[in-house]
Every structure is written in C-alpha cells, then in structure tokens.
Image (cartoon, helix red, strand yellow):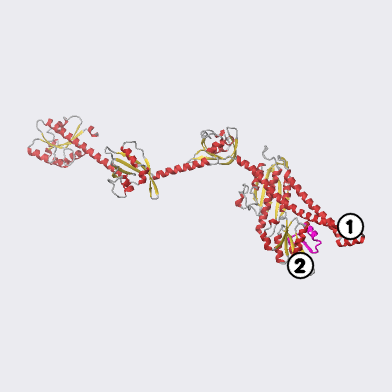
C-alpha cells in the first residue's frame, strides 16, 4: 500500500442506499466507488484497484454472494462484505466458504458500520 | 306276472291232413281246455321249433310225424316248453323211447283221448308256468345284483358297510382309493382306517350310534387335513338290517365347501364394504324404491335401522329423484352421474348436503334392474371449504407481509442512516454558529475545515432523499390498507381492471427484480362481485406466474427475467381476465390436478397447495370459470371468465 487512500466499492440496486452509505463514509477519507448493478460492479472490479467490496445481497440478475464470488476471482485480496435486510436467510456455509468478513444488517447502525469498515480497511 | 293274462299257446305238430294228420282229434281234444287257449298247428319240425322257442307254452308232437318229430324233441330237450308225444297206439317200448328222447309225457289216442289229453296238457302247462316264473325271479335278482354292484363300484363317494361293532365288512373301490391304499378292509375297525381328525370333526362314533338306534339321519360335515390340503366330507350313516350292519357314506365335498365358502366370503366382503363405507348407499328398483340400504344411508336420511326397504327415494331426494334428476335419468336412460350436488330433505326437517353418484344396476344380460345411488354427506366438506378459503387468505396475507416488509426495508434503511448523518450535520451547523459568534475569522476557518458549502448542500440532499423514502413507505402502507379493508363483504358492482391494478401494485414489490409486467386492459363494464375475493384470485395468479418465472430462471441457470401480461376483455355477458407468463409452464401430468386442494409441486413451506383451488372456488362462486392453457413458446396462461351478473339471479353466500 502506498500513501493512496484505500478504495471501497459499494454495490446496491437502490440508489438512495448508495447515497446514504456514501454520506455516512464521506469523512473517513477513503475513495468510495458505487455500482447500482452487478454488471457495473464487475466492470469496476476489473478496472479499479479495489481493496474492499460491500454488496447488497438481493439484487436483480445476480445475488450479492455471486458478486463477491466474482470479486474473489478478480481481486482475491479485496475484503468481501455483505449488507442485507434479511441476513438470516443467507446460508452461513456459503459466507464461510467465500471468506466473507462481515455481514451487516439493513437498516444499519452508522457507528457500527464505520467501525467494521475501518477494521476491514486497516488490515486489508 | 304279466304273462298270466296272455293266452296259453299250444303248438301241435302233426302230419298234414293229406298225409293222414288230424285223425287222432288232437286239436279238438285240446279245445276242451277252454277259451284262452290258442292252438297253432304245424306240419314240420322247423316251424314247430321256431314257435316253441318264441311264444309256445306247450308242444304236442304226433308220433306219426316220424323223424321230424324226433328233431323237435331234440331241439327242445335242453330248453324250451315241454313236449308231449301223442301216438295212435303205444307199447311200453314206445313210451320208454319217448321219455328217453326228452318228452314230458306220452299220451295214447285211446277211447278217452279227448279227456286224457287236456288233463295231461293242463298239468304240463302248470309245471311250465311255475318253472318260467322261478326263472324270471332269478333273472331279476341277478340283474339287481349287477345293478347294485355297478352302482357301488362307480359311486362317486366312499361307501363302507360296517358290522354292529363298527368293523368294516366291505367297502367300494372309491373307499379303497381314498382311505385304504390297497390294504385289506374286512374286519378292521374304523379308527385305524379313517383319519382321526375326520372321525373327530364329525364325531363319527356318535353318528354310527345314532344310526344304529334308528335315529333320523342327518348328514354331517367332517374336515380332514391331507398334507397341505384341507378336505371336507359329507358323512352319513344308515342302518341296513336287523343284524345292526350300517352303511357309511363319505362324499368328498371339498370343492363344494370351497365354493360355498368363497360365496360366503365374497358376500361378507361386499357387505363389509357396503356397511362400513363412509357414504350412504341405496340400491333402488326400477320404480325408484329402495331395495337395499346401508347403515350410513339410514344415518344420513335420518331413518331407523332397516326401515328404508320399499320406500320411494323421492321421499328424501326431491330434486335428484325428479324426472330430470340424476337418479331418474339413471333409471330411464342408464345415465351414469358422478358427484352431483344434492340435498337430502329429512323427515325431521333437517337438510343435508350430499354428493350424489348414480349408476345403473344391470344383470349379466345387460337388462337394467334399477340404480345404485351413493351419497356421501358433504356438510363437513362444505365447512372445510370455507375454512380453507380463510386459511388461504391468511397464507396470501403472509406472503404479502413478507413482500411488504422487503419493500419497506430499503427506504427504512437509508432514512435511518440519513437521520444519523443529519444529526452529525446539525452538530456541525451548531459549531459553525458558535464560531460565527466568536468572530468572522474563526468562522471562516471552521467553514473551510468542515467544507460548509458541501455540508449544507448534502444536508438538503439528505432531507430530500429521506422525505422521498418516507413517502415510499407511506405509499406502501396506503396500498396495504386499501387491500386489507376495502371490501365490505357484499356483492357490489366492481371494476375488475382496478382490482387487477391494485393487486399488481402490491405484489410488484416482490417480483420487480425478475419480471417485466405488461398490461393490456380493455374498458370493462362493472361486474357484480366481491372485489376483495377477486383480488385474492388475481394475487394467487400473479404469485403463481412469478414463481413459474423464478422456476424457469433457476432451471436455465444464469440471471434472467420473465414477462407477465395482464389482459382483460369483454366476452358474451362477462369479462375475461388473463394472466400470462413465460415461466416454467405446467407439465401435462399436472394439468388436470392444479385446481385440486393441497396439490402443489412446490417445496415444503413454499406453497400451501391451496392458492389455485381457492381461486377456483372463488371464481365458481362468482358463477365464472377458470382454466389454465399452455402458452405458445412456453409458460402458462390462466384465464378467468366472470359473468357480469354474478351467479344466476341469486345472492349466494360469500
């Protein structure tokens, strides 16, 4: 890692969620990229030096787990995290197999979100 | 004996008159015996012998016939009627010679010939008749013996004659074959010969004792086990004579007993079914009168045990027994009716809903004898149907709640996050206000540090986005309230397009990720309906279409979406609503069953299996029809027809 700020990719099909997440994190000093479709997320993963991915789970066409699977292939070192309104419905086995670092419930607690992301990006 | 009435026949063999025959006056003498004597005169041995062997009782031979006479004697010597020789004059030699040659007597034509000859003839006739009678008796006895032997030898039952002590005297071949296997019979006690289980099961010793005492003979059935095979015997005993000999008859009736048992079993089996079936069953004759009724029929019809026979079915089945009713049609046309809705009107005033099935009763020749009517009591089913409707409503509300929660969660999430952030922004604004009081330089410095311009802009943005989020939540809650409370349970003129729209709006949240929804509505007249129930139907059809698309997407792998087309049109006196999807489709083997209650192809917990059957029921109550058609290019089209006036002229229960 050089002196560049770490790059975080946020994926959610709901633009207002991306907007609120970005707002929460604006003072963290990270470079925050957003994608409102899985396809866009994959493109960014290919093009940008991404250090961590936080993806919504239930999205049209591709689930968050599938996005993280693609991320693991493209950038194995990027920290993988999920955010979901129904965290209990996501199979724990798959989370473990994919090495998902955190599963954040929606709605989220801002302070908790920042704490988790700081921890993830500090040792990425 | 029959012969006694026949005329006595006497053959007279003498030379022809031309050769001097008849001069003795033999024929005349014989006529003195009296009426009833037929005398035939012949002139040669051949004629005499033929007559003698066929019908004659006595032959008189004139010695003047010479050698011919000797031939007659020789021919009749061993068998045949007696022969008496008449001779013009006789010496002792002549007499001796005639006796030696086999003649029965010899009469000399002396002066008293006319008296002597009839006397001799009568005596010979008597002797001959007695001998004939004895021979006839012997013959009859011999023939009876042969008959008896033949019967006994070929009698298809085992016969044994026992002495008074119960020992075998003689047995027939069938008995030997069945019980002796070639061993000697005579003198053996029955114990060692007949199987013990046979003797015991019919108590044969007791049977023999009763026969010996002359008691009335009652056949008994005995059972014996012959290896694997159980055999049955009809056993009888009969006292034969004063010495106490007994005839024992054992007829193998295994096959008869087996058939009889089969008939009994079959009858019991059928009675069992009829008596325990959970449906009323009556067999009616051609005059529609009850011939047979099972206990359940008595219970449903509310009548006493055994009181139905002979009564007219129209006493209870008003409509079904009417001329155009199903029972009447079975009787008149041989029509088969299955599960027709009917009502039993009982004498106690109660009415019971039943499903009537009626089939013709025909004999082996195909002649109609009446009808078999089966009618389960469906009152519980009717109750259950309304419960199912309620359950399904609850289930669809559950699915709806899950979809709604999902839809509320996103705006809730960002409004929640924005509020935290706005709290932080407010803190920044407060600090800026403090700084402004402290002096313009301090303020300018802090404003730079906080990037106040951006902060204010984003504060406003956060407020707008949160307002939008809360507005979305408000809209969802409004929809939900509309769905839950609008229907007042009465038949009202409803706007089917609006029902369809509001349902689509509610379920849209659940399916928007994988479905493109197209609406092809026609302008519709109002339909007499329960709008809330129709919405339930539409929701089930939409959820079904959505799940079919999900199933197809999952099957094909990779992501994908589907298209649902909602269409409405007018047709005849009603409207047609179609819900078309390009999902997985319905496999042909399921097509007939999809409207059955509890039929589901979904995983446990995913579907109650009640959605389509409930929809079917609701549509039926609206007087309409629902059907599923395969869509060209894959998928399914559900088509609902609703008559504008609702169910005919009446106001059915909702």
- For the record, the magenta segment spans A17-39
Q: Label 2: state its secondary structure.
A: loop
Quadrant of the image for the N terminus of chain A? bottom right
Q: Give the quarter of the image for residue B34.
A: top left
Magenta stretch encompasses residue B215: no
Using a 10 Å C-alpha cutoff, classify the residue at mark 1 as few (fewer than 14 neighbours), some (14 to 19) or many (20 or more): few
Kindly identify which numbered label has been placed on residue A49.
2
Residue B147 visible in the current orientation: no
Give the camera-side residue of B465 and B66. Answer: B465
Kindly identify which numbered label has been placed on residue B291.
none
Residue furthest out toward the bottom: A2
Judge from the rendering whether residue B226 lies leftward or rightward of residue A90; answer left or right: left
Q: Position of residue B3 (x, y in %)?
A: 23, 34
Q: Residue at x 87, y 58 (%)?
A: B431
Kindly identify which numbered label has been placed on residue B434.
1
Q: Position of residue B241 (x, y in %)?
A: 28, 38
Give the camera-side residue of B214 and B572. Answer: B214
Judge from the rendering whether residue B41 lies leftward or rightward of residue B281; answer left or right: left
Whole-angstrom CA distance, mark 2 to mark 1, is: 42 Å
Q: Position of residue B596 (x, y in %)?
A: 62, 47
């Amino acid at each position: 890692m050089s002196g560049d700020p770490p790059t975080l990719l946020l994926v959610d099909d709901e633009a207002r969620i991306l907007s609120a997440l970005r707002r929460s994190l604006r003072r963290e000093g990270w470079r925050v990229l957003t994608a409102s479709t899985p396809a866009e997320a994959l493109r960014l993963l290919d093009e940008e030096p991404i250090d961590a991915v936080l993806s919504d789970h239930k999205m049209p066409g591709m689930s968050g787990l599938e996005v993280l699977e693609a991320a693991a292939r493209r950038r194995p070192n990027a920290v993988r995290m999920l955010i979901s309104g129904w965290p209990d419905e996501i199979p724990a086995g798959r989370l473990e197999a994919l090495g998902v670092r955190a599963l954040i419930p929606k709605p989220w607690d801002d302070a908790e979100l920042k704490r988790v992301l700081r921890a993830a990006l500090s040792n990425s | 004996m029959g012969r006694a009435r026949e005329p006595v026949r006497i053959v007279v063999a003498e030379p022809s008159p031309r050769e001097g025959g008849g001069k003795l006056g033999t024929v005349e003498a014989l006529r003195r015996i009296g009426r009833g004597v037929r005398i035939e005169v012949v002139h040669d041995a051949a004629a005499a012998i033929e007559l003698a062997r066929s019908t004659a009782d006595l032959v008189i031979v004139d010695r003047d016939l010479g050698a011919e006479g000797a031939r007659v004697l020789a021919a009749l010597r061993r068998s045949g009627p007696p022969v008496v020789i008449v001779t013009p004059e006789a010496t002792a030699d002549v007499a001796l010679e005639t006796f030696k040659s086999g003649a029965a007597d010899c009469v000399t034509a002396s002066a008293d010939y006319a008296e002597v000859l009839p006397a001799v003839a009568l005596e010979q006739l008597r002797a001959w008749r007695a001998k004939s009678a004895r021979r006839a008796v012997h013959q009859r006895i011999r023939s009876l013996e042969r008959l008896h032997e033949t019967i006994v030898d070929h009698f298809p039952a085992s016969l044994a004659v026992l002495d008074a002590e119960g020992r075998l005297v003689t047995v027939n071949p069938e008995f030997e074959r069945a019980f002796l296997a070639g061993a000697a019979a005579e003198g053996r006690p029955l114990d060692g010969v007949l199987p013990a289980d046979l003797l015991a099961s019919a108590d044969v010793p007791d049977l023999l004792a009763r026969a010996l005492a002359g008691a009335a003979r009652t056949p008994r059935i005995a059972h014996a086990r012959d290896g694997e095979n159980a055999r049955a015997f009809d056993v009888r005993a009969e006292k034969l004579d004063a010495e106490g000999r007994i005839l024992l008859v054992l007829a193998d009736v295994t096959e008869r007993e087996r058939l009889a048992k089969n008939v009994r079993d079959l009858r019991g089996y059928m009675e069992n079914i009829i008596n325990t079936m959970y449906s009323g069953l009556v067999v009616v004759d051609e005059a529609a009168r009850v011939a047979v009724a099972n206990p359940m029929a008595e219970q449903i019809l509310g009548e006493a045990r055994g009181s139905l026979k002979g009564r007219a079915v129209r006493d209870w089945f008003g409509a079904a027994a009417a001329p155009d009713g199903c029972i009447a049609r079975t009787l008149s046309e041989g029509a088969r009716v299955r599960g027709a809705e009917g009502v039993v009107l009982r004498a106690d005033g109660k009415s019971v809903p039943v499903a009537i099935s009626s089939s013709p009763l025909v004999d082996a020749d195909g002649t109609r004898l009446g009808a078999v009517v089966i009618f389960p009591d469906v009152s519980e089913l009717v109750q259950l149907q309304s419960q199912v409707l309620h359950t399904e409503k609850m289930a669809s509300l559950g699915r709806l709640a899950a979809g709604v929660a999902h839809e509320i969660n996103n705006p809730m999430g960002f409004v929640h996050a924005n509020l935290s952030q706005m709290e932080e922004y407010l803190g920044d604004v407060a600090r800026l206000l403090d700084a402004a009081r402290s002096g313009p330089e301090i303020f300018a410095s802090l404003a730079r540090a906080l990037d106040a311009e951006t902060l204010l802009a984003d504060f406003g943005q956060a407020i707008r986005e949160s307002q939008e989020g809360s507005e979305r939540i408000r809209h969802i809650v409004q929809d939900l309230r509309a769905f839950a409370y609008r229907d007042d349970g009465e038949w009202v003129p409803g706007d089917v397009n609006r029902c369809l729209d509001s349902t689509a709006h509610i379920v849209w949240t659940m399916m928007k990720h994988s479905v493109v929804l197209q609406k092809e509505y026609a302008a519709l007249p109002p339909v007499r309906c329960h709008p809330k129930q129709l919405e339930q139907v539409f929701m089930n059809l939409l959820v079904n279409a959505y799940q079919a698309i999900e199933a197809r997407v999952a099957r094909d792998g990779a992501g994908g979406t589907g298209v649902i087309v909602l269409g409405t049109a007018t047709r005849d006196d009603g409207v047609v609503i179609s819900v078309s999807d390009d999902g997985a489709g319905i496999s042909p083997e399921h097509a007939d069953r999809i409207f059955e209650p509890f039929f589901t192809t979904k995983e446990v917990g995913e579907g109650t299996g009640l959605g389509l059957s409930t929809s079917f029921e609701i549509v039926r109550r609206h007087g309409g029809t629902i059907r599923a058609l395969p869509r060209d290019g894959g998928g399914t089209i559900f088509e609902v027809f609703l008559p504008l006036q609702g169910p005919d002229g009446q106001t059915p229960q909702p």
